[in-house]
Structures are given as structure tokens and as C-alpha cells.
Image: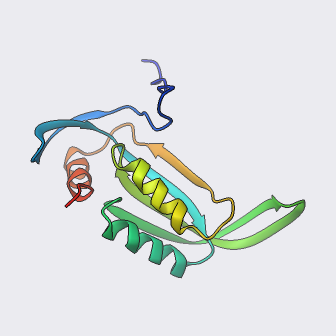
């Protein structure tokens, strides 16, 4: 089996898993769980962004992982500092909105924002993520 090739018209095109969910628009949709990750200066900032994105239903779940030390070049100087990782769980459908909201809230000039698609997800968990990221 070959790797899925991205669609040139959308940078967020990903493999999708068919799943039946109870939604007003239909009985079955194609969707994939994605994880969006970023680093932030501290847990307070990460928690605030996590709460905002969950409250706005752009993501179903947000996890803050502490005790991360980063080493990197910034403006010609090697830097090292403590950061936290924020991992956001959402769907391929909601991911563009989640990334835009994350960009708006992010305190860094050049934030690390990555998206990783999950090849397979427990169907009940995927169903929950889909339901929680639906507009209300």
C-alpha cells in the first residue's frame, strides 16, 4: 500500500476514515483524526489557548505536556529555554479553523505548528471527536 499523496489544492488534505455518526446533515461522513501540536512559553498560556479552542469547538481535546527544553537558533543566536507542548485533537474537517485560531492566539513570532494525521483511530473516539467539533 502506498502513502496517500497530498492534494495540491489543499495543504490539509489527508487520508479519511469512513464512520457513521448521528449528525443533522447525514448519517455517514468521511473524516480523520488529526493532532495539531505547538510549543508555548508556559502552562498558563497553553491552558488559556486550550480552553479557548475547546470552548469554540475547534478541537475536542487539548493536552498540555510540561517540562520541555528547546535549543534552537533565533536571529543568529543559539537559544535554550523551557517550554510546554500543546497537543490538540480535532478532525480533518475542523483542522483549518483550529490552526487559524491557534495562530491568532499564539504569542510567538514564528510559532511551531504541526499537523499529524492519525492513520487509524478507535471508531468510538473518532465519533466523539467529530461530535464535539460540530458547530452548535
- Residue 135 x, y percent position in the rendering: 23, 57
- Residue 36 x, y percent position in the rendering: 47, 53
Q: Quadrant of the C terminus?
A: bottom left
Q: Does residue 128 lie above or below 85 as drawn?
A: above
Outermost residue on the right side: it is: 76
- Identified at 49% across, 62% down, the residue is 102
Outermost residue on the top side: it is: 1
- Identified at 45% across, 24% down, the residue is 4
Outermost residue on the bottom side: it is: 44
Which corner quadrant of the image does residue 108 belong to?
Answer: bottom right
Relative side of 55 to 11, left or right: left
- Identified at 26% across, 45% down, the residue is 122
- Identified at 48% across, 28% down, the residue is 9
Number of labels in the image equals: 0
- Residue 112 x, y percent position in the rendering: 62, 56
Using the image as rendered, state which of residue 35 and residue 57 is in the foreground.
Answer: 57
Relative side of 75 to 4, left or right: right
Using the image as rendered, state which of residue 85 and residue 13 is in the foreground.
Answer: 13
Which corner quadrant of the image does residue 19 belong to?
Answer: top left
- Residue 16 x, y percent position in the rendering: 32, 33
Q: Quadrant of the N terminus?
A: top left
Amino acid at each position: 500500500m502506498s502513502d496517500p499523496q497530498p492534494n495540491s489544492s489543499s495543504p490539509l488534505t489527508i487520508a479519511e476514515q469512513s464512520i457513521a455518526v448521528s449528525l443533522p446533515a447525514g448519517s455517514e461522513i468521511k473524516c480523520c483524526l488529526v493532532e495539531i501540536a505547538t510549543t508555548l512559553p508556559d502552562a498558563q498560556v497553553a491552558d488559556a489557548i486550550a480552553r479557548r479552542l475547546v470552548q469554540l469547538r475547534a478541537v475536542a481535546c487539548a493536552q498540555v505536556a510540561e517540562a520541555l527544553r528547546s535549543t534552537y537558533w533565533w536571529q543568529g543566536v543559539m537559544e535554550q529555554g523551557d517550554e510546554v507542548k500543546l497537543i490538540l485533537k480535532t478532525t480533518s474537517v475542523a483542522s483549518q479553523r483550529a490552526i487559524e485560531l491557534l495562530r491568532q492566539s499564539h504569542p510567538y513570532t514564528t510559532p511551531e505548528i504541526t499537523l499529524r494525521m492519525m492513520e487509524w483511530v478507535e471508531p468510538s473516539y473518532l465519533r466523539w471527536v467529530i461530535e464535539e467539533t460540530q458547530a452548535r
